[in-house]
Image (cartoon, rainbow, N blue to C red):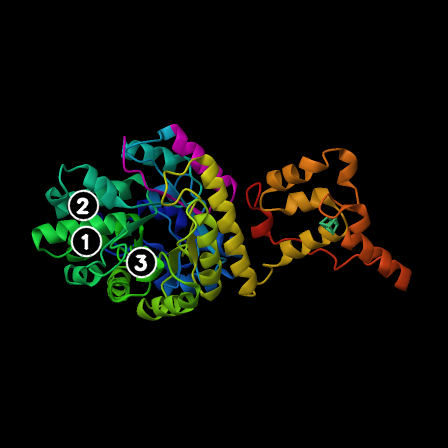
Amino acid sequence: MTHEGDVTPHAKNVGVGVKAVGHGEAATQLGFARAGAVTEAMKRVAQREGLDAELVRSEVAQGRLIIPANAHHLATSLDPMGVGLVASVKINANIGNSALTSSEEEERKKLHMAVHYGADTVMDLSTGGDIPQIRQAIIAASPVPVGTVPIYEAFTRVKRVEDLTPEILLQVIEEQAEQGVDYMTIHAGILLEYLPLVKNRVTGIVSRGGSLLAQWMASHHAQNPLYERFDDISDILRAHDVSYSLGDSLRPGCLADASDEAQLAELKTLGELTERAWAKDVQVMIEGPGHVPMDQLEMNVKLQQRYCHEAPFYTLGPLVTDVAPGYDHITSAIGAAMVGWYGASLLCYVTPKEHLGLPNEEDVRHGVIAYKIAAHAADVARGRRGARDRDDALSHARFTFDWEQQFALSLDPETSRRMHDETLPDGFYKEAKFCSMCGPKFCSMRITQTTAGLLEGEVPSGQPPAVPRESEASLPAGG
Ligand code: SF4
């Protein structure tokens, strides 16, 4: 079942200070960090973040930073990245089919779209078709960490929910770990005794995995098998260096259910499980809500940090209002920006199709851009070194009417150029000191320059543009 002590796949990541890892010791990034070793993956994360490698090691060792990097994926197409307070805020894009629609090719296109626009991780949430084959194709093509929710595949292997066995669950988890999945959502925190806590909720249990597990527990009158077998699961994850993304089965599905007893009871259990995973050198991040009013967001981040010992927080949005189906990339990006500012480390995107249907390629693009904005705004608000350089450079380009530079620095250059071209397509207007918004006579920036010239005898050029940091400048096209 497990491969304790299997360190071969990590050979290229054994860093300075590591001579050997003995049989039975954990060959995970957390295990190396605790042993004082700086791995190649940690060095790469340090380079991408503009941090000292020793700081990265120290944060990984304390569980505040994770490097989701399955040894098998790391040995092939993965470019290691970090999720944690010390790193820039990251975004995840969910892809994957449903039993009703999509194909392997469509999912590959979504992966490409997500990575092109700057998704830092992707989750394959496929629930139909040949799930292992689609996942294999995604892992092979993905330079970013790939996450999954193994319980989806486990439930496709049984006819009825109550037919699921702990053995099937562990088997699916192990198969996915062997395939190269970098992190897994494991819904181990929803306990049998928490089920009565949702009876007065407006939207009940909205997590797919959580609702299925609740049905299984209710039909068997038995405890959550993911909780009961948690240490066995940790052994599997450790053998391949898969990170936990501890699932929030009891997240609120509407504002009315936010921060209720069920949600917080599960969060405390996730804190307990975090320590059990760490005891086996398995990296952990914690999934969070959901739908939460803005005034409860800071409290939610603080509680997660307290209960879960500062393990990185990975939130779904949160959506700050329930009234905008079709626009939930916006309702959720507002919450995402705020929790990112308060201390969340990874923001799971929501697309305009949320609650309405399976997102297509275009929905993925809208979701990723919305979340690049949220994550970047959070980095700026956190005062992260260099985070505002790109804003300042774009503002300078804007004030000096350097349209080409303004497009190039945009998160979505194609769209900003297209919108400018809609009214002023001629090349001449790419040097014009106005656009169609106010026109030449009312262009306030042109007027400001003229006024300053009259007062000072010179035209203000604004602050000289700072050069975006490597991590910003090297983002995939469009951001
Ligand atoms: S016309 Fe208005 S919107 Fe356009 S560049 Fe000038 S001030 Fe900005």
Crowding at dot 3, Cα within 10 Å, few <14 / some 14-19 / many 20+, comes out as many
Q: Secondary structure at mark 3?
A: loop
Crowding at dot 1, Cα within 10 Å, few <14 / some 14-19 / many 20+, comes out as many
Give the amino acid at mark 1.
Leu
In primary-sequence order, the first of circles 2 and 3 is 2
Q: Which region of the structure is painted magenta? A: 105-129
Q: Nearer the viewer, residue 431 or 312?
A: 431
Q: Secondary structure at mark 2?
A: helix
Give the amino acid at mark 3.
Pro
Q: Is residue 117 magenta?
A: yes
Give the amino acid at mark 2.
Leu
Do labels 2 and 1 touch, CB within 8 Å? yes
Q: Nearer the viewer, mark 2 or mark 3?
A: 3
The answer to whether residue 39 of the structure is visible from this angle is no
Q: Which mark is residue 226?
A: 1
Q: Quadrant of residue 20?
A: bottom left
Is residue 108 positioned above or below 71 on the image? above
Q: Is residue 165 magenta?
A: no
In primary-sequence order, the first of circles 2 and 1 is 2
Residue 399 appears at what percent x and percent y? 75, 53
Q: Which mark is residue 252?
A: 3
In primary-sequence order, the first of circles 1 and 3 is 1
Q: Residue at x 36, y 60 (%)?
A: 255
Q: Secondary structure at mark 1?
A: helix
Q: Residue at x 60, y 60 (%)?
A: 386
